Image: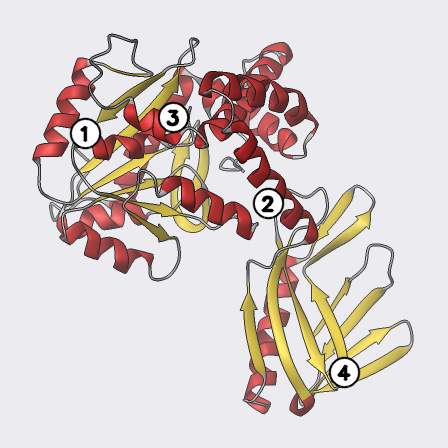
Amino acid sequence: MRYSCRNRRFGPTQGYELASDRLVCRTYSIATDLLFKEIAEIVVFKERLLGSSRSYWACTVRCKGDIVKITSAHRANPVTIEDQVASYIPFIKEFERAALTANPDIRFIDDEFRETMGTRLLGFLSLWMAVLLGLFPRRQAASICGNVLSQIGPLLRGHRHARRQLVSAFPGLSARQVTGVLRKMWDNIGRTFAEYSHAQELMRSFLPDVSGARPVIVIDDSTAANLQHLGADPRGALMFAAHLGNWEIPAMAAQAVGRKIALVYKRQPSRIMTEQLVQFRACFAAQLVEAGPTAPREILKLLRDGWLVGMLVDQHYAKGVKINFFNHACVVNPILGRLARIYDWPVYGARAVRLPDQRHRFELVGPLALPRDHSGRIAVEGAMQAVMNLIENWIREAPEQWMWIHRLIR
């Protein structure tokens, strides 16, 4: 079995071949043998190439003082990344199997979230930006951050993905309209980032205000009735949201009705950014559940104990279920539908729409009547389609407030 890649930007192509008892590495005409019995350590991790919007798997092999790196992507030229994941995965899996079978003493490390220098610097920068923005009033901090990001955002690589998705979803938009929507999208992302530092103020907006001041968060009669119903129901419940407006506000509503909520979160590329988000969300979430193999078990226990469990569902998930989204076949995580199916937990949808005067309109719908199969139980694919239909309608109402940089439409 053979594989080849370039480990350095301007380095030569490295060839790798699996033999019965060794990994043969070739550079030009020079061959190096790494005997399986002499390998001390294999580390697998994800890395992000400079200017790339996605991460790629790689691994390092340590053998008698030599360190060999095998990557799943490299730069074919200064602006193009050659993705070799399709051939890398089978090769590296066979290598791991053969090496660990021949030498069970190999130290195998799965370091999926290894930080690069760039992500580490970005984490430090975001931390200090959050501290600085906390010194300004909420409205001023949001305006500053929104204006800055609306200028910088179009220069970032993710802007191209956002434009491609927006045009796919709304093919009738003119070039000027697309540019306007995307600039407002970056403005919304910047304002949401600034509002993390003012989470306490947003939370207080759900409480009765006797001062007569205009509330920061506006709630209509229908949402007020749904909130009252949610607060009176002692059963566990699922609440979903999308990356719309300020997507953290829906979780804040739980405290307004006296319910404890746990939030499912995904670890960020930067450790500092992850810790920072966890710290901010701890202000309004009683518990945080990291997305991973043990998450469904943790969520089930919380639901049985009468908790609300909130999650964002508008992202691509390679092993998920297929749904129709803006007339495109997309794949999303089915965990919401699967959890709802187990014990017929009630499911609520929530969003916060950013208003022109720097206030937010909070909306809560549910419990939703989700599609069921012939046995009378909730149908997972039908449930996820119904959820994404609702999210699509929300996006159509305010396309500039959805995070188009998420590559859901592929």
- Distance between the alpha carbons at the discs numbered 1 and 3: 17 Å
Question: Dividing the image into 4 quarters, which one contains the N terminus?
Answer: bottom right
Label 2 sits on a secondary structure element that is: helix
Residue 188 visible? The answer is yes
148 left or right of 330 in image? right
Residue appearing at x 66%, y 51% in the figure: 48
Amino acid at dot 2: Gly
Residue that carries the numbered disc 1 in the rendered image = 366
Amino acid at dot 4: Gly
Residue 246 in the image: state x and y as whole percent: 41, 26
Label 1 sits on a secondary structure element that is: loop
Q: Residue 147 falls in which quadrant of the image? A: top right
Whichever of callouts 1 and 3 sits on the residue coming sooner in the sequence is: 1
Residue 131 in the image: state x and y as whole percent: 53, 35
Label disc, if present, on residue 27 of the rendered structure: none
- Taking depth in this image into account, of 109 and 173 the one nearest to the observer is 109
215 left or right of 373 in image? right
Amino acid at dot 3: Glu
Marks 1/2 in contact by CB < 8 Å: the verdict is no
348 left or right of 73 in image? left
Label 4 sits on a secondary structure element that is: loop
Whichever of callouts 3 and 2 sits on the residue coming sooner in the sequence is: 2
Label disc, if present, on residue 65 of the rendered structure: 4
| Viewer-nearest of discs 1 and 2 | 2
